Image: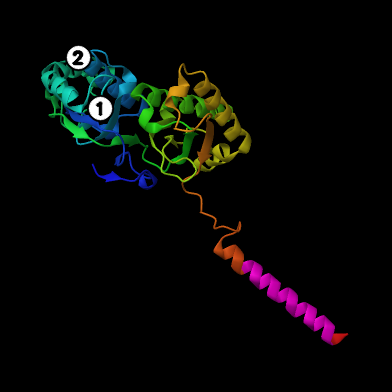
Amino acid sequence: MTAISCEEAVCCEAVLCSGCSKKVSTTVTMKGLDLDKCNDAVKTKLKKKVIDSFLASLSGYKAEDLVVTLSKGSVKATVVITPKAGSDVAALKTVVKAQAVAVKAQVLAEVKKMPEVTSGTIFEKGKSLADVTVDVEAPVEATAQPIVIKDMKAVTRHVSVVGLDFDKCTPSLLASLGLFVQAAFLTQLKTYNAAFKASDVVVRTDKSTAASSRGSPQVIVSITAVVGSSMAAVEGAVSNMKVQEAVKTAVFEKVLAISGIASFLQTGTVSVRVEIIDPNARAVPKGGMDAASDSNQLKALGWLLFLCLASATIS
């Protein structure tokens, strides 16, 4: 996978975004399975099987510490793990490497129990249950985290908790911020279409570089359409000012309820606010209009002057 900027993560299933905190990455390959034959429900099951298998071997870790991205090549599950408090990348790599055999065995056992596997509906052409095997690659240090975006463009928003210091925030706090934002958007989206679920609202938290929120935690939200909806409808809902205010209020209230939140504030800051930005919106230069608007206004003024002069000449 290639590390690219968050803004470039538009039209692929999974990318790696550079500039994130250090983590450990490994890849689990489930040979004999065909990703193209897996619907969203099956993909969710596979991800959960992988996560549960790792958690069984990683003491002190929670599901939110792991992010799994599926890709083709039979079925590849790229697993990115955030070191728990008190640990680091080196220690986590050692544990993941030592537990690779156990993880491999558990993933294989759990996958083979899935009805979609026992029935053969997601096998690669010409494969059978006997051909299903699992490989686990050696863990490596990853300074990037997957953004999971389905095979279509996603509506993207950046939600910053301005005033908090990203470098002071613990991994669990950053994970919580992501969950706050996800829940807030999901609540609003369900008022438009009850079919929206958590997997349609993918979040990732990193450090904001925007001028208005530099150094604060920033949750990157990618929302895909559901049956009965369209990308235009999703964009319209997310752009609605009432929706944005509701999301900001919900996130703000959750942040204020965090115990000891003052210890995570930026130096010299005494309060926080929530900001939502559309990363694809055109930047507007100082003065309030873009170059095209400037040109149109000049043309309008020119015509107005011409008409005034013409009127004066006729009279």
Please give left or right for residue 53 compared with residue 235 in the image: left
Tell me the element at label 1: loop
Picture coordinates of residue 112 (x, y %)?
20, 17
Quarter holding residue 66? top left
Q: Is residue 306 magenta?
A: yes
Identified by mark 1, the residue type is Ile
Please give left or right for residue 292 compared with residue 226 in the image: right
The image's mark for residue 122 is 1
Which residue is at a point 52% across and 33% down the rendered structure image? 228
Which residue is at a point 51% across and 42% down the rendered structure image? 277
Q: In this view, does 306 lie above or below 288?
A: below
Which residue is at a point 48% across and 35% down the rendered structure image? 159
Closest to the observer: 110 or 84?
84
Picture coordinates of residue 309 (x, y %)?
78, 82
In this rendering, does residue 115 appear at all?
yes
Q: Nearer the viewer, mark 2 or mark 1?
A: 2
Picture coordinates of residue 208 (x, y %)?
41, 39
Closest to the observer: 146 or 44?
146
Give the residue at the far front of this rendering: 268
- Badge 1, how many Cα within 10 Å: few under 14, some, many 20+? many
Number of marks present in the image shown = 2
Which range of residues does the magenta coloring cover?
A: 296-313
Q: State which tag comes first along the sequence, 2 or 1.
A: 2
Quarter holding residue 142? top left
What's the distance in space between the residues labelled 2 and 1, CA to CA?
Answer: 27 Å
Which residue is at a point 53% across and 43% down the rendered structure image? 232
Residue at mark 2: 57
Picture coordinates of residue 156 (x, y %)?
45, 40
Tell me the element at label 2: loop
Closest to the observer: 4 or 118?
4
Identified by mark 2, the residue type is Ser
